[in-house]
Image: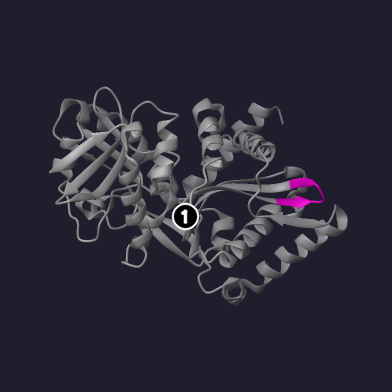
């Protein structure tokens, strides 16, 4: 395998252009999952400015590159998909017809093991068919917003009716409602992160924004704007007051939904749902194909989705002591989490326990 492992700063402008071209052609060539902005060079380069172990494997065949695999590597050779735990799409971005040997690939990358938690479809050389499968709900808007609303109404006319009624009530009771699809004020991004941190603490989850590198990554991506990639902040306002916001990543065909949050003082108006419907409307107007809501079962995702993609979670490993030790540490935790998520009689009590911890943490 003719492969070079590069640091982010070593990726040439020509490499980035080929990478972007592979993504731009992916949807027309039957691999729309590769058009996800989490698989774009801009995301990898932003993570590389915040994390020291980022590397990019560039595979060449003939005259030029045919595949790119971004990953993070420890000094011991443990590999993680780029942004593991944060990114909602991972894998090799490649030319149609390119096939690889997983063992040969990770060996050439200097890895003993490579771990994924959102491996997209079409990555069979990694053995993804043997990995656990998870649904990633999407909102299709390629036929326009009105067509999407008709599909929602056919499934639950009450949901659509009550959500728009709450939007009107918010306008009457608080202030006129307006939606900004591409908000450029960084102060609103900081407001969103405060809301999300409070939500994590309130629900007993780990606060991602307690990690300075994640805050830096958000700020980097907010200011990243190219023809093929944008960090997109969308905001629902009541008057001049933001009541719900979302930060995600946009490619020419996909809006990857990432961090939504709202001001809990306005929860009775369901501002998060209103925001997502307005985001879908704006995405349709911009000729996007779909919004990817990301892996995970949530009531709001079930209400909004039109279908589901699938992503995989698993590890590719060589017979190596470091790999065996890593799997021994990680596998039991993953197995327990999967068992809880798969059984409602366990996931319900677990969620209530986390919320109880959150109340103790916040003193409520």
The percent position of residue 360, horizontal first and vertical second, equals 65, 28
Which residue lies under the disc numbered 1? 251
Other-residue count near label 1 (Cα within 10 Å), few / some / many at <14 / 14–19 / ≥20: many
Q: Which residues are magenta?
A: 236-242
Residue under the point 53% across and 67% down: 287
Which residue is most to the right? Answer: 173
Is 248 placed left or right of 59 in the picture? Answer: right
- Quadrant in the picture for the N terminus: top left
Colouring method of the image: one colour
Q: Secondary structure at mark 1?
A: loop
Residue under the point 42% across and 57% down: 135
Residue under the point 40% across and 48% down: 40
Depth check: 182 or 290 in front? 182
Depth check: 119 or 14 in front? 14
Is 337 placed left or right of 216 in the picture? Answer: left
Q: Main secondary structure of the magenta part?
A: strand
Q: Determine whether 17 is above or below 207 in the image.
A: below
The percent position of residue 237, horizontal first and vertical second, equals 75, 51
Q: Is residue 207 visible?
A: no
Is 345 placed left or right of 333 in the picture? Answer: right
The percent position of residue 351, horizontal first and vertical second, equals 55, 42
Depth check: 47 or 24 in front? 24
The percent position of residue 68, horizontal first and vertical second, equals 28, 46
Q: Determine whether 82 is above or below 135 in the image.
A: above
Q: Determine whether 352 is above or below 23 in the image.
A: above
Q: Is residue 237 visible?
A: yes
Was residue 140 drawn as part of the magenta stretch in this picture?
no
- Quadrant in the picture for the C terminus: top right
């Amino acid at each position: 395998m003719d492969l070079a492992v590069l640091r982010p700063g070593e990726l040439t402008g020509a490499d980035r252009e080929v990478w972007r071209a592979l993504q731009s052609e992916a949807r027309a060539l039957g691999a729309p999952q590769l058009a996800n902005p989490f698989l774009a060079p801009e995301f990898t380069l932003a993570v590389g400015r915040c994390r020291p172990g980022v590397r990019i494997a560039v595979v060449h065949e003939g005259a030029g590159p045919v595949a790119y695999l971004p990953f993070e590597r420890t000094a011991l050779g443990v590999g993680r998909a780029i942004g593991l735990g944060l990114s909602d799409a991972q894998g090799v971005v490649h030319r149609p017809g390119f096939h690889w040997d997983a063992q040969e690939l990770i060996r050439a990358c200097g890895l003993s093991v490579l771990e994924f938690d959102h491996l997209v479809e079409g990555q069979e050389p990694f053995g993804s068919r043997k990995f656990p499968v998870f649904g990633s709900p999407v909102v299709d808007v390629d036929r326009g917003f009105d067509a999407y609303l008709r599909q929602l109404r056919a499934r639950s006319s009450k949901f659509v009716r009550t959500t728009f009624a709450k939007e009107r009530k918010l306008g009457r009771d608080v202030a006129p409602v307006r939606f900004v699809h591409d908000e450029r004020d960084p102060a609103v991004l900081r407001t969103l992160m405060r809301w999300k941190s409070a939500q994590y603490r309130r629900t007993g989850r780990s606060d991602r924004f307690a990690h300075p590198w994640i805050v830096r990554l958000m700020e980097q991506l907010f200011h990243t704007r190219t023809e093929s990639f944008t960090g997109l902040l969308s905001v629902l306002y009541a008057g001049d007051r933001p009541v719900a916001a979302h930060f995600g990543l946009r490619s020419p065909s996909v809006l990857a939904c990432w961090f939504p949050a709202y001001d809990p003082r306005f929860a009775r108006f369901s501002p998060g749902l209103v925001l997502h419907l307005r985001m879908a409307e704006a995405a349709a107007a911009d000729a996007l194909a779909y919004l990817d809501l990301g892996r995970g079962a949530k009531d709001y995702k079930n209400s909004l989705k039109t279908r589901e993609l699938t992503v995989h979670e698993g590890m590719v490993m060589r017979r190596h002591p470091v790999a065996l030790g890593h799997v021994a540490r990680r596998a039991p935790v993953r197995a327990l989490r999967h068992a809880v998520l798969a059984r409602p009689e366990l996931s319900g009590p677990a969620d209530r326990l986390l919320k109880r911890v959150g109340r103790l943490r916040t003193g409520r």
